[in-house]
Image (spheres, rainbow, N blue to C red):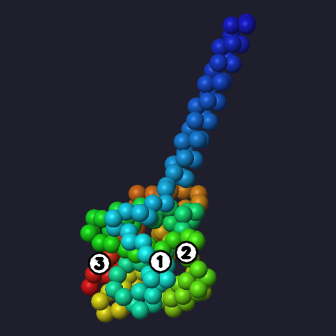
Amino acid sequence: MKKNLKVLIGIVMIIIIICLGGYYLAKKQITSEVYYDKTPQMIRELPEVSLKKLSDKQQGLYYFGFPTCSWCLALLPIFDERLEKLNAKSLVVNTRAEDYTSQDDILLETFFIKYTAEKRLAVPFVVAINSKAEVKTHIGTVEGHDATKEKMTKKQVETLHTILDSLILFSNK
């Protein structure tokens, strides 16, 4: 009888360990993205310099986000990948950095409201400006994606590829 009890306790312990390990791995997959904006494709300047270029509608790509933003964590590595694939570069502004001022925030929010249908700044915010000073924007990742709860599906990533590629190509016109 004692032997059967020991075997049963052993089986229960193994099941608990497997369940906890599965939970840990699943949770790690959702939150394992790293905010890395220091790649050759991502140009970092003082926020006021990047925002002046944006306000002057200087041709190029502009990315705005911050490290604790779940959507930024999901979008940034994909944006970097698309920039590299299409041999493009983007100015990158961390909207929570110490050198990002309230004046910078006012300039960005003013631009954001003017060129989106939104009433308040949201990130990640990607802006493409072409040689004719025409502006296209993208906010967030893709419709229906809640970055606080799940990673993007393969189809969502492909949709984001299409969106980002169109912005990159638009900025080169």
Mark closer to the chain start, 1 or 2: 1
Q: Amino acid at mark 1?
A: Leu
Residue drawn at x 51%, y 71% is 94
Residue 21 showing in the rendered view: yes
- Circle 1 sits in a helix, a strand or a loop, which is it? loop
Image depth: mark 3 or mark 1 in front: 1
**Residue 46, label in figure:** 1
Residue drawn at x 40%, y 57% is 154
Residue drawn at x 49%, y 83% is 48
Q: Is residue 82 above or below residue 154?
A: below
Image depth: mark 3 or mark 2 in front: 2
Mark closer to the chain start, 3 or 2: 2
Residue 132 in the image: x percent, y percent? 31, 93
Residue at numbered disc 3: 169
- Circle 2 sits in a helix, a strand or a loop, which is it? loop
Q: Nearer the viewer, residue 39 or 146?
A: 39
Residue at numbered disc 2: 99
Q: Is residue 56 above or below residue 27?
A: below
Q: Are marks 1 and 2 in contact (CB under 8 Å)?
A: yes
